[in-house]
Image: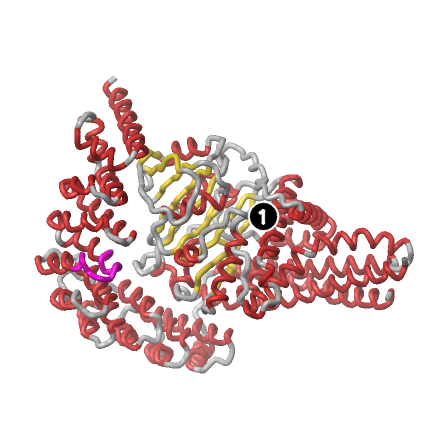
Amino acid sequence: MTELLTIVVATCLGYLVLLTLIYVVFALVSAFENSVRRRESAVEDYRTLSSSRFTIPVSVIVPAFNEQTSLVPAIQSMLDLDYPEHEVIVVNDGSTDATLDVLQEAFELERFETFARTVFPSGRVRGIYRSAAHPTLLVIDKENGGKADAMNAGFNIARYRFICGMDADMVMERDALLKGMRLVVQDPGRVVGVASQLGLALDPGRAMAVSRGRRRVERRPLVAYQHLDFLRAFLTNRLAWSRLGFMLCASGGFHIWRRDLVEQIGGFALGFTCEDIELTFRAHEYLQRQGQEYAVLSLPDNIGTTEAPDTVRKLVSQRERWQRVIGETVWHYRRMWFNPRYRIVGLIGLPFYLLTEVLAPAVELLALASLPLALALGVFDVTSFLVMVGAVAYLMASLSALAILLDDLHSRTYRRRDLAWLLLLAPFDIVLYRPIIFWARFKGTWRFLRGNKSWDRFERNVRSQPA
Amino acid sequence: MHEIVFLTAVLVLAISFPLWLLLSLVTVLGRLRYDRRQRLGAKTPSARHVRRLLKRALEKPRTEIGEWRRIAALNRLARMEHPATAHVLYHALWGDDDKAAAAAVRCLGGLGSPWAIELLVAAMRGGRVPRSRIASQLERLYPEPAFLLLPLLRDPDPAVRFWGATLLGPYENLGEGDLVELARDEDANVRAAAVEALGNRKSEEAAEATVALLDDAAWFVRVHAARAAGHAAGPDAAPAIARLLGDERWWVRTAAKDALEGLGKDAAEALVPILTSRDRFARNRAAEVLQDIGLVDFLALAHPGSSLLARIYAAGGPRFREAAEARAARARETMEEQAA
């Protein structure tokens, strides 16, 4: 029994050490990538880019399901984007609340018919609306079919060479599209996909009303920890993936894709819980098979703010869904695991996902089950355990601090005192926030194994009425 | 095992705690310094600093970060309009570092002086920097480059001719003869650019050239020709453009629809025969243009029983009719409210 326990504890510790090493290496690569992107962005001629007719036009597609509380500020921010030519296509995916009415009132919508070819099949379109106030806004009202189906419906009607998917709760920075398209415009033949960093707030519209540099980070620890989580994911992980050539997660909040690629790979897939990660995997798979030189990039620019769940229940619901879709996608593309045909994507990207995302809940569960027993039987002494927890806490806090530093160097978005607040919270992440995420990931894995593919979107936060 | 775990954990803690502290201090103090600098504004660089910038701008960097430092130095010198700017930008533009060359293009566009424009036009010929970036800068300097662009139209390289024609678009009185010539170029991209530029002109030659390209073999030339013919040839081109509503390529149909909408009510007559086309998409799109130019709403309000409206409804389908009737009902309500 003791021997078995020793093996289990040693395995868990080995996993922890391996994971830590990987994260440290990725953090260093990310810091380098951030430095390059920061210098690049500092000398970019955004003024010319924002007025030139040679800047590639973009179709923004916003799927919306029951978004009556968050949609108007989000769409307004998308219409206000500083970009030479873009259209905004909102797809009301059979909302059962007043989403369409709210849109109609806010943007003076009127029903018109617009004929489009069916590139990808989608749910029945009930009507198409144009705005009298904003000629670049188009609203498709269709029967419910899920987010991927809504994206496909928007894609069918989109006019431009690049499409940009945005979430209906995202409030964008005015220069979001310029920042996102900056590298595409330089090399549209090679850069096929772009994602970028997002901020978090309970009410994105209110948060974004404050100018950059004076913006607040939510003080509530639950939201602040999610903010830290986002910063770590985007600035000490995805930047490294982007640099190394296996950016496997262009999140639904903001993702730009070259239209012809999406067309070639068959559009957004309906058979998955979420469509964003799967599309990224499929794009890599296709382009690697074709042997094409390409880039899917993740940028450090803070391009907008999305809504953060404000209760533990909502957070668990969101994160378990994310875990489920990671499980579904990594399993679906198992032929790519360790497959040299897919080069770095198959040899490092997919195994990384497998190791850090898919297997993590199982190892964490094993550790949780064996540790008390190991402590009780003396396989592992309490002092070592406590020192180890402290070591992991400060190591992770160091990665968080690096993420905060990289974000501040690049975007200078938040107030100094809020940065200090995040830095102080970081060491307690392991005891205050990780257990919630562990539970969500465990639940997500369990539901993935049971084949559950429901959407379970978290209920939107209640907003205070503007004065 | 106890000892190994304990010692490893102590070691990690001994490194990670000070590291967290250090990064936190760097973050907060760095931001404090940044905020102070923002408040005080930019300082005039010292002579020593300028010398360092010059050295950096001219030396060959060994690392990627070094490349960006060089670019930052180029930028800074150009912004300061330092007397050596022309020299360092020339050096960067024709050196072997592509990123520095691209940065030089941006700086030249920012300067906008005659020598900078000449260098940009020369860079357009050279083709080291993506030509779209050079074009953005030359376009930004409108109308200064004007005559310097004309030789590009006769360049042996089709890519240069393409950009020459594209850039000449906004210059309504310049190079029309050459553009008409280029509308018959053997390279389809050049033809597309030429026809697009001709779209901004009102002469008979320009109109003829744009209408002739409506039947081009390359679909993207037809796209540009449809849009250009709408502008250059006006309502006379409407029947020829309307024909493109049934083109084999979707993008050509879309361009034709946009061009017809641009013609407004003058396009209506040309669209009526298309309403009974055997091609469903052509019928649909003809109905859509009539809707977008306001004819459907007018008929639905003033002549709801007209045979033309019935034909348009038949071409547009039930959803089209539903939308039109909803708009008409709303318009009637508004009128009644106003009358009351």
Residue A2 in the image: above or below residue A105? below
The range drawn in magenta is: B213-224
Residue A230, given in percent of the width and then of the height, sits at 59, 53
Q: Main secondary structure of the magenta part?
A: helix
**Few, some or many C-alpha atoms within 10 Å of disc 1 (few <14, some 14-19, many ≥20)?**
many
* Residue B70 shows in the view: yes
Outermost residue, front direction? B278
Q: Is residue B111 left or right of residue B243?
A: right
In the image: residue B336, left or right of residue A424? left
Secondary structure state at the residue bearing disc 1: loop
- Residue nearest the viewer, comparing A321 with B33: A321
Picture layout, residue A248 above or below residue B76: above
Identify the residue at horizontal 19%, vertical 25% (top origin). Answer: B305
* Residue B338 location (% of width, % of height): 25, 22
Q: Which residue is mark 1?
A: A217
Q: Is residue B303 left or right of residue A5?
A: left
Q: Position of residue B45 (x, y in %)?
A: 44, 72
Q: Quadrant of the N terminus of chain B?
A: bottom right
